[in-house]
Image: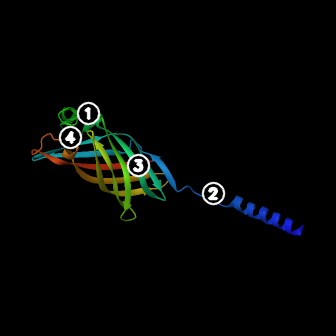
Amino acid sequence: MKKTLLSLATVAFVAGLLSFAPATQKNYADLTVNLEKSRVDWVGSKKSDFHTGIVPLKSGSVSVSGGKLTGGKFVMDIANLKVTDAAGDRLAGHLKSAEILDAAKNPEATFEITGVNYTSESTATVSGKLTFNGVTLPLSFSANIRNSDDKGFFAQAFFGFDRTLFGVKYGVGAVSNDVQLAIHLFAK
């Protein structure tokens, strides 16, 4: 009888201690991209000039685990691409035409993260699949991860890609094949 009472008292004591222990924190999160704050800037060049603009994001999410980026998917709104220099709406309309991006046929581009390899505490090589202009190809780039936890995410990346690999052949020889991107991504 004493053993039974001692066992019950021990169980009650341990249960009481555990009830005061701090809750285990969740170390992973799926965060939604802040569409107002995030942006994709682009620069296209030719022999004697360049043009700048933005591609708005339509949607996006990132996955974070243990304070590290682990995945994500983003949809860019090609149909609402903007030119931010003096060429403005005239050039934007030309870029969205069937002759170049054919935004009526391909109004969106998507990027899906397939792998993340951290090279330092705050730098990672992000690999994924970019679907642009109806073509899907692998794309990797270096990203600076400024914040990554279950409450928020902020990262930046600066890289170029060859537009001709995605079937955008307009002006080859006069217009640079490389389009430079600057991505600023916030999620909560």
Tell me residue 187's x, y (percent). 43, 48
**What's the distance in space between the residues labelled 2 and 3, CA to CA?**
28 Å
Can you name the residue that lies furthest to the top here? 104
Of tags 4 and 2, the one toward the viewer is 2
Q: Position of residue 90 (x, y in %)?
A: 18, 32
Residue carrying label 3: 72
The image shows residue 8 at horizontal and vertical percentages of 82, 63
For the point 36% across and 60% down, the residue is 124
Residue at x 28%, y 35% (from the top left corner): 106
Q: Give the label, 4 or 1, closer to the camera.
A: 1
Q: Which mark is residue 85?
A: 4
- Mark sitting earlier along the chain (3/1): 3
Amino acid on which the number 4 mark rests in the picture: Asp
Taking the image as shown, residue 104 lies to the left or right of residue 67, namely: left
Work out how far the residue at label 4 is from the one at label 1, CA to CA, in angstroms: 20 Å
The residue that disc 2 covers is 23
Tell me the amino acid under the disc marked 2.
Ala
- Residue bearing the label numbered 1: 103
Q: Residues within 10 Å of mark 1 (few under 14, many from 20)?
A: many
Q: Earlier in the sequence, mark 4 or mark 2?
A: 2
